[in-house]
Image (spheres, grey):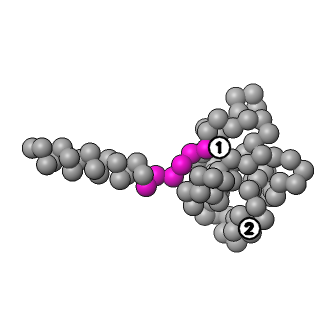
Amino acid sequence: MKVSVFVMFLAFAMIGCASTPEPQHLAANQDACWVCVHENDLACVKVDIDEKTPDHRLQRQDYHFCSEQCKKDFLANPAKYEKLALSGASQTQPAHH
């Protein structure tokens, strides 16, 4: 009995660690770099948006990136990141948008 409880706890912990991080609590001048979200790069998930921020508009949706490399990765395979972005967009939008 004790072993099965430990195994269940361990399984839940592993599932939690393997999940994709969701950027939350973004300010009005921030967006998520969905390439970094997909790659679990927590250091770059939130992007401060200004005139130098790499961006791309795809199907009436603006995407912002933490770097030119992330933008290139996105453009090489937008479908890989777009589904994740569209599913998480409602959770990451600032309340006043």
How busy is the neighbourhood of tag 1: few (under 14 within 10 Å), some, or many (20 plus)? Answer: some
Name the residue at 9% across, 44% down.
1
Question: Please, what is the three-letter code of the amino acid marked with disc 2?
Answer: Gln
The magenta-colored residue range is 18-23
Q: Secondary structure at mark 2?
A: helix
Residue under pointer 1: 89
**CA distance for labels 1 and 2:** 22 Å
**Horizontal and vertical percent for residue 80?**
60, 64
Quarter assignment of residue 34: bottom right
**Front one among 79 and 76:** 76
92 relative to 3 in the view: left or right: right
Where residue 30 sits: x, y (%)? 75, 42
Q: Nearer the viewer, residue 55 or 10?
A: 10
26 versus 20 height, above or below: above
Q: Which residue does the numbered mark 2 point to in the structure image?
A: 69
Count of numbered badges drawn on the protein:
2
| Rendered position, 96 above or below 37 | above
Can you name the residue that lies furthest to the front here?
43
Q: Secondary structure at mark 1?
A: helix
Q: Residue 90, image x and y in percent?
A: 63, 39
Picture quarter with the C terminus: top right
The answer to whether 69 appears left or right of 88 in the picture is right
Q: Is residue 37 visible?
A: no
As shown in the figure, which amino acid type bears the numbered disc 1?
Ala
Q: Residue furthest top?
A: 96
